[in-house]
Image (cartoon, rainbow, N blue to C red):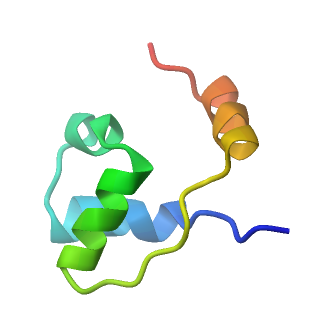
Amino acid sequence: MAERFPWQAAMAFGFAVMRLSPQEFWAMTPRELAAAMRAFGHGVHAPPERGSFEEMMGRFPDG
């Protein structure tokens, strides 16, 4: 089974380290966020797989 994307750590990094607004954070793709985390020297995990991402999108649709 693939490792789950660390959303709690990603949100903490985006909001506390990068000081992104929620709109800026959620506009980023997982790959963009991973690149930003690497640039700041933070370890990252693989982005979610397609099925996991589609499930998340179904649970949390854009308004």
State the residue at coordinates (30%, 43%).
28
**Residue 13 at x, y percent in the picture:** 30, 69
**Residue 45 at x, y percent in the picture:** 53, 73
Quarter in which the C terminus is drawn: top left
State the residue at coordinates (37%, 44%).
29
Q: Nearer the viewer, residue 17 or 41?
A: 41
Image quadrant assignment for residue 44: bottom left
Q: Of all residues shown, which one is farthest toward the top?
A: 63
Q: Nearer the viewer, residue 18 or 52?
A: 52
Q: Of all residues shown, which one is farthest toward the left?
A: 19
Horizontal relation, residue 59 to residue 44: left or right: right
State the residue at coordinates (28%, 65%).
35
Q: How many labels sit on residues?
A: 0
**Residue 40 at x, y percent in the picture:** 18, 79
Horizontal relation, residue 46 to residue 25: left or right: right
Horizontal relation, residue 19 to residue 55: left or right: left
Quarter in which the N terminus is drawn: bottom right
Q: Of all residues shown, which one is farthest toward the right?
A: 1
Q: Is residue 51 shown above or below 40?
A: above
Horizontal relation, residue 54 to residue 45: left or right: right
State the residue at coordinates (59%, 63%).
5
**Residue 27 at x, y percent in the picture:** 30, 35
